[in-house]
Image (cartoon, rainbow, N blue to C red):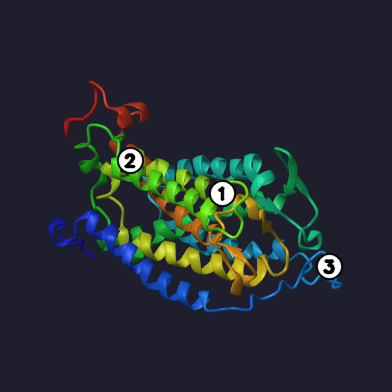
Amino acid sequence: MTAPRSHDWPRPAVCAAIVAVMLAMLVLPAALTLHSVRAPSLPVFSTDNPTPNPSPYGYTWSLLLFLVPIGVLGLWFGWHGELEIRRAFWWTIAFLGIAGCLLDIIFAQWFFRFPNAGAIVGVHAPAIGKWVPVEEYLFYFSGFLMILLVYVWLSENWLAAYTEPNYRAESAKIAKLLRFHWTSLVVGVVLIAVAVLYKKEFSEVREGWPGYFMVLVIGGLIPSIGFFDEVQRFINWRAFSLTMLFTMLISLLWEATLALPYGWWGYERERMLGIFIGAWDGLPIEAVLVWIAVTYGTVIVFEVIKLQQASGRPAREALLGGRAAAPGRQG
């Protein structure tokens, strides 16, 4: 398949806006419909529920929602993935896998709880302040792995016509990848400010701070603040949009119909923003937003590492520039 000429593509800013509109087309009608529910559903599992274990090993089995796509796409990736893409892929997974585990290690004591002991195999892993099911670490690691595999498959195969065809030549034109992106910083600050204002003035749970929301905004936008200015034109926005929608579909199936009703995991309400979806057993809005933030951050990190690999320069030199950097735009 022949890649379209660059001037036939919409500008990266337009592509990003189109993705936002696609998301809004789903979110706005769904929010209005869910808001119309006046009698919230009740969870299947609760500490007062006489049913002792309505979903034996449910959390453990549910990991197949990530593991099956990983297995299928992993076969394709192992057969067709180019060496530079493989290197960028595994460096991205190593970096983000550690970041995902840190979410549990540091924040599990404040954000999450696991009431249904019968839904897990019973092996626990350490975290600050409490132990968490080992499924939690598998959940985050496999989540990053699946997201990146889907994006790579879409951008390198299914929607390859919209991927930059010559990373090596284009990366040589970039003096440095690290460039401050003020718009991302402003968006992050505004989102956090609005979240704090909403929780303290309008939320049904005004105690505490919207810590989980703040972590999602900061974690999702840090790669954007540092690298969006350079990598936006390399992101395959069509592949990104489908990756995000696919991930959100799995997430909502997981959270709204399984995890919360059956007590596989839950959320500390005082650490949430305060927007709870009654039709989905009081699911906090953060559970919907987490995979948007994760997908966005994952794609940016991957594209940064992919460009560094294609440039052939050491990471420090590619990120910060230097006398040995290839000629290109000056930073």
Is residue 227 found left or right of 298 in the rendered image? left
Q: Residues within 10 Å of mark 3 (few under 14, many from 20)?
A: few
Q: Secondary structure at mark 3?
A: loop
Q: Which mark is residue 48?
A: 3
The answer, for residue 216, to whether it is visible in the render is no
Q: Earlier in the sequence, mark 2 or mark 3?
A: 3
In this view, which residue lies farthest toward the top?
Answer: 323
User: Residue under circle 1?
Assistant: 212
Quadrant for the C terminus, please. top left
The answer, for residue 283, to whether it is visible in the render is yes
Q: CA distance from mark 1 to mark 2?
A: 24 Å
Q: Which mark is residue 227?
A: 2
Picture coordinates of residue 266, whole percent (x, y) = 68, 59
Q: Earlier in the sequence, mark 1 or mark 2?
A: 1
Quadrant for the N terminus, please. bottom left
Q: Secondary structure at mark 1?
A: helix
Query: Is residue 33 positioned above or below 188 on the image?
Result: below
For the point 69% across and 54% down, which residue is it?
135
Amino acid carrying label 3: it is: Asp
Q: Identify which residue, 26 or 146, lies in the foreground.
A: 26
Q: Are marks 2 and 3 in contact (CB under 8 Å)?
A: no
